[in-house]
Amino acid sequence: MTGDVTVEPAPPKQDRERRARRRRPRLKIALSIAVLVAAGGVGAVAAFGDAGGSGGGTATGLPPATAKVTKQTLKDAQTEDGQLGYGPAHTVTSQAKGTLTKLPESGDEITRGHELYEVDGAPVVLMYGSKPSYRPLRSGTEGSDVKRFEANLSALGYDGFTVDDEYTEDTADAVREWQDDIGVAETGIVELGRVAYADGAVRVDTVQANPGEPAAPGKKVLDYTGTAKAVTVELDTADQRMAKEGSAVEVTLPENQAVTAKIDEVTTVIEPGEQGEDPTTKVEVTIWLSSAKAKKAAAGYALASVDVTFTAGEREGVLTVPVSALVALREGGFGVEVVKGGASSYVPVETGLFADGKVEVSGQGIAEGVLVGVPK
């Protein structure tokens, strides 16, 4: 004989559905916010189907915990490790045939009109310009490369010609005078390989050849950087939003001295994988320390590790809630569960900047000090 068993009746279907709706919002919102954070914290209003409560609807029960809507300055900032040095290195390749007879040393600084290295006992001279030589220059030659060379010749103090696109006999006369000064044959022709162009004064980084080795077109001779101090930072591609050309950053040097600077260049770099591994993509950021204060602060360091603080966005005096307070509304977009007394209701909100676990919000009934629901 079996004993009596009491079976509790199943809750009505309506109650079960209500409980299911009460549990869904936090689970769904976790996935929604993960997507937003992965995308850089962009505060766009997005639809997520039947993800949660209905805007303006009354919630069932009270949330497990609450937080106040806070008015504050929200700053999307991130600090990364950087390297103080002289910026990216560039390679000089020979354009002349012969034998390398003299090379500079690492750390040498070379300015316009001075010898960069020697081939067959004759100098290869540094000039300033953004494009390399590609042909000899002689009387009758025309083009922007002529003007670039003539501008350098004029800057070195030679005259008697007009700085323009035309290489005239007057230019050739000035070139003969220059050739006499640097100790090469006075032909009036600037042969290919006699001049090497860089954006400005250079600092020899590494020397890739040795005296006595043959010089030939395409042979790597040396690597150089600029002479000004610069900071380079490698960012993950997910953090690319932090680095925009012209944006201000704060660089903290050794001994905690902080200076402001601007981002000069943002480059995507693909690093090949080793031993069959996939290549990795990084974002390389270059920050030149060009202000007088920054130059003075960095003067005592050749190479050093520094901290760089990037700011992707800043909003002053905005209303914020914890990111975890957001719920995905059934009709689309985001809302928060506003708690008043012993009841709560879902209120739609517009989201703005995401930073430090907080999100900027606005909407009807959203004011400083209002209580909103959050997970426990």
Image (spheres, rainbow, N blue to C red):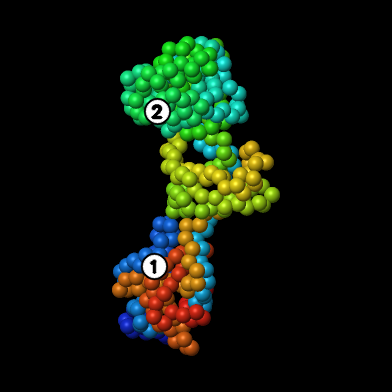
Residue 182's x, y, as percent?
A: 53, 17
State the residue position of label 1.
28
279 left or right of 66 in image: left
Q: Residue at 49%, 63% (x, y): give it.
A: 314
Q: Residue at x 65, y 41 (%)?
A: 299
CA gap between label 2 and label 1 equals 72 Å
Q: Residue at x 58, y 22 (%)?
A: 104
**x and y percentages locating residue 34 in the rendered image:** 43, 61
Q: Which mark is residue 162?
A: 2
Q: Is residue 113 above or below residue 260?
A: above
Q: Give the mark nearest the N terminus, 2 or 1.
A: 1
Within 10 Å of disc 1 (Cα), the crowding (few <14, some 14-19, many 20+) is: some
Q: Secondary structure at mark 2?
A: loop
Image coordinates of residue 72 in percent, x first then y, are: 53, 71
Q: Quadrant of residue 21?
A: bottom left
| View extreme (right): residue | 255
* Residue situated in front as seen by the camera: 135 or 275: 135
On screen, residue 174 above or below 201 = above
